[in-house]
Amino acid sequence: MAELYANAVCLAPMVRMGTLPLRLLSLRYGADLVYGEEIVDKRIIAATRVSNGIKLLDTVDYVSNSSGSVVFRTCDEEKRKVVFQIGTADPILALQAAERVASNVASIDINMGCPKHFSVHGGMGAGLLRKPELACDIIKTLRRNLNIPVSCKIRLLHDTQATLDIAKSLEQAGADAIGVHARQVHERPVDSAHWEALAPVVSSLSVPVLANGDIFVRDDIDKVRETSGASSVMIARGALNNPSIFREQGLLPSTEVFTVLRSYSRADELLNVVVVDYLKICAETENLYQNTKYTLSRMLPTKCDPRGVQTATVADLYATKDDPEVFALWDLQRFYKDTQERFSARANACNLSVVPDQLAQLAIGASEA
């Protein structure tokens, strides 16, 4: 099962941003695997599986029984490429969560690297690095009961031997691959990733190691592979900055990364190609407006402008109040309207008088196995 992760260039898990549109865009640009955002075990356990089928979106949604919101949305296009990441501190809950989605994803990953207070305080994320026996028990439980690959994502520990010890233990527990963020728990994105510290881990394991941290341009993929020996990489901020980093030919339509261009107006022009592709997928998958807006705000180059300058595009994005206003910023009003009309026509053909984002609330209780 480890073959899934071998020689792979992957979209890393990113909270709030690793939703279906960014995953599909990354796959279409050439990503081998795409990780969804971390979802806490109890959230997915308490969700109802709803298949939209041919009626509306052609997606499978896991819908919160309490709020009616979509906890996780996926589709056939990514089924063999999407990794579902679980936030958990309990083997039984982890298994229950994994079993809920196993038929719709390629693999299950356990988050053992998130340093945020919410995760660590609840014993999840990097909190599991302090409890290696529990971390291994979670992996063992999943491996015994699932017929799809199981992996985990960790961070570097305080010294090389400590990192090796837990990585080897997780491999022995049954992990088919291990992602390693090349920073320690206390380090933040402003601190440089330690690619060289991954080399002992890679050489000590027989399963694929996915190197993560500070991969911003296509050349960085080769550099981290050479430095660490890892055959696979996972890209977070570099992919968010410009998802076309997954193209073998390089970024669209330039080989330069927009965040380091001297001309920020030119950077906006370059990124517009990617933003348009992203927005079209958002429309076609009925992505939540707030999520679209948030992801775009992180994608725009001026967020990385050291001068703190905001362009009209960023200011206008912050001022939008709904999807039509966002799409209008990139002259996609017609595309958005046509997509909505297509949804309505399909709904009418099925005797439904609802738009796609209302389907989830109506469909709770009509779960499909």
Image: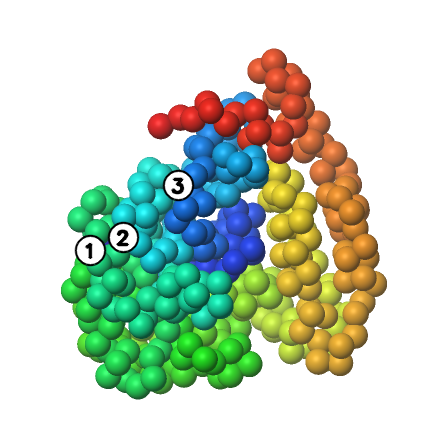
The residue at 32%/61% (across/down) is: 152
The quarter in which the C terminus is drawn is top left
> At label 3, which amino acid type do we have?
Ile
Residue 46, picture quadrant: top left
Q: Residue at left 75%, top 48%?
A: 326
Q: Which callout, 1 or 3, points to the residue nearer the camera? A: 3
Instruction: Specify the farthest residue to the front.
Output: 121
Q: Residue 45: which disc?
A: 3
Q: Is residue 313 left or right of residue 90?
A: right
Residue 311 falls in image quadrant? bottom right
Q: Nearer the viewer, residue 124 or 298?
A: 124
Instruction: Locate residue 312, reporting x and y percent.
Output: 83, 63
Q: Mark 2 sits on what residue?
A: 91
Circles 3 and 2: CB atoms closer than 8 Å? no
Could you tell me which residue is drawn at 33 percent across and 79 percent down?
157
Which tag, 1 or 3, sits closer to the chain's start? Answer: 3
Amino acid identity at mark 1 = Lys
Badge 1 crowding class, 10 Å Cα cut-off, few under 14, some 14 to 19, many 20 or more, is: some
Q: Name the residue that disc number 1 marks.
A: 140
Q: Are marks 2 and 1 in contact (CB under 8 Å)?
A: yes
- Up/down of 23 relative to 303, above or below: above
Compute the Cα span from label 1 to label 3. 20 Å
- Which amino acid does the dot numbered 2 rest on? Pro
